[in-house]
Image (spheres, rainbow, N blue to C red):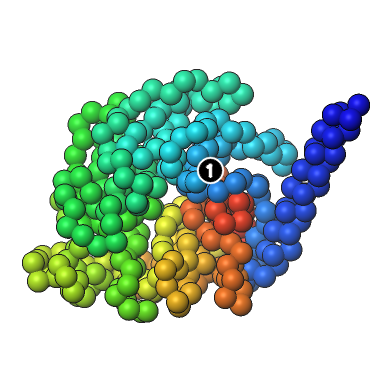
């Protein structure tokens, strides 16, 4: 009886504490500032929520970093269920869905879970697609996604803040066939990209890149880059932003041999997930434009980021950028940190937050 009572109390406390956390997030979301007509709500509670992907049947898959888990969220008429479909993985941050299978990157390995949406309650044992990526944990939370060419692209960050690591293995974006064959480097000089996407019309790759630390409080800028073709070099570790030479490595290469960013982002904002908005819910001016999740500053006295930012293009060139959502940073304290963005079939946005352990839904209603 005593054990039964104890377990009942534990379950009661856990359930009520979980409800309280959800209620707290709902209250905190009232602090988020959005343009007129937009609203934000709590969509799901997911510990350490990082990269997002969606399956053919509408299942939302969520990677994590420190939690070591991969989650699947199903939504039946507004009733959502969060399942843990993989656990005890090392930094399973990146997830991608392709032809019925879920791909998960965990440091040096990419795993494939076949027919995953039909087996959420009893996931299959994964197939190892490739296991030859670097094993370092520094910048080891990789991003993966399938491109319009049906190849799987994977970011590999530098194993340091700033160094001349082997450029055939680090600071790059690579791509492979879905079965792990035909590895090749697509872009180099990329310090740490944790988000990329392809323009809906041109099918060209755009990606965020997090700049190095400790140059100064306002340098270097972070970057949004445009890789229109294979083989481009984006500067790291020699050049930062458009023309800032690295104090240690800059003289070895300079900036003139590197592709400058499409636009410089503010220093220390840590841009991560980015998506082109191809949905139909938002006003027309948002169509085929880029939204970026800025995770927020690290190792800096000046706090910045913790927000969502739109970047507007015209004729494949950036014409302006503006803050879209902010309020996760309050009085110097960050209660939330946006990580990734997913455009849902109805046109709403999902936004993951690894600090609050939450996924939000941003929608638009005409006045």
Q: Position of residue 149 (x, y in %)?
A: 28, 38
Q: Residue furthest right?
A: 1
Whether residue 236 is visible here, answered yes or no, is no
Q: Is 129 placed above or below 256 here? A: above
Q: Considering the image in quadrants, where does the N terminus appear?
A: top right
Q: Quadrant of the C terminus?
A: bottom right
Residue at image x 73%, y 39%?
79
Q: Identify the residue shown where x is 89% and y is 30%.
A: 2
Q: Quadrant of residue 106?
A: top left
Q: Nearer the viewer, residue 263 or 122?
A: 122
So how many labels did they put on this image?
1
Front residue of 310/287: it is 310
User: Depth check: 164 or 229 in front?
Assistant: 164
| Percent coordinates x, y for residue 305 in the rendering | 48, 70
Task: Name the residue tied to disc 1.
Answer: 67
User: Between 18 and 122, which is closer to the camera in this rendering?
Assistant: 18
- Residue at (43% x, 42% y) in the render: 91
Vertical order, 180 against 223 (above or below): above
Relative to 60, is 101 on the left or the right?
left
Q: Residues within 10 Å of mark 1 (few under 14, many from 20)?
A: some
Dot 1: element? loop
Q: Residue furthest left?
A: 252
> Which residue is found at the position 20% from the left and 45% from the top?
169
Q: Measuring from the top left, give residue 255's x and y in whole percent.
A: 14, 70
Can you tell which quarter of the image residue 164 is in?
Answer: bottom left
């Amino acid at each position: 009886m005593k054990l039964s009572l104890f377990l009942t109390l534990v379950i009661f406390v856990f359930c009520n504490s979980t409800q309280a956390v959800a209620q707290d997030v709902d209250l905190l979301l009232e602090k988020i500032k959005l343009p007129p007509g937009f609203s934000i709500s709590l969509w799901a509670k997911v510990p350490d929520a990082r990269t997002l992907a969606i399956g053919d049947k509408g299942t939302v898959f969520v990677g994590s970093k420190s939690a070591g888990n991969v989650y699947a969220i199903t939504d039946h008429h507004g009733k959502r269920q969060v399942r843990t479909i993989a656990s005890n993985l090392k930094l399973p941050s990146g997830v991608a869905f392709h032809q019925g299978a879920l791909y998960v990157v965990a440091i040096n390995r990419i795993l494939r879970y076949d027919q995953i949406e039909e087996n959420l309650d009893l996931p299959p044992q994964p197939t190892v697609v490739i296991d030859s990526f670097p094993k370092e944990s520094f910048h080891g939370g990789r991003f993966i996604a399938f491109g319009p060419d049906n190849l799987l692209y994977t970011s590999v960050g530098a194993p340091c803040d700033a160094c001349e690591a082997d450029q055939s293995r680090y600071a790059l974006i690579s791509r492979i066939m879905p079965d792990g064959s035909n590895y090749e480097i697509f872009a180099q000089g990329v310090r740490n990209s944790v988000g990329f996407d392809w323009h809906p019309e041109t099918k060209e790759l755009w990606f965020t890149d997090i700049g190095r630390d400790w140059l100064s409080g306002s340098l270097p800028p972070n970057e949004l880059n445009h890789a229109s073709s294979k083989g481009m070099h984006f500067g790291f570790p020699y050049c930062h932003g458009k023309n800032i030479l690295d104090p240690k490595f800059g003289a070895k290469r300079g900036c003139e041999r590197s592709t400058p960013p499409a636009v410089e982002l503010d220093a220390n904002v840590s841009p991560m997930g980015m998506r082109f908005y191809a949905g139909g819910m938002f006003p027309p001016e948002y169509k085929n434009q880029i939204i970026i999740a800025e995770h927020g500053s690290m190792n800096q006295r000046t706090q910045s980021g913790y927000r969502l930012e739109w970047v507007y293009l015209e004729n494949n060139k950036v014409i302006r950028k503006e803050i879209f959502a902010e309020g996760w940073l309050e009085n110097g304290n960050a209660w939330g940190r946006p990580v990734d963005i997913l455009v849902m079939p109805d046109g709403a946005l999902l936004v993951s937050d690894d600090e609050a352990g939450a996924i939000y839904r941003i929608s638009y209603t005409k006045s």
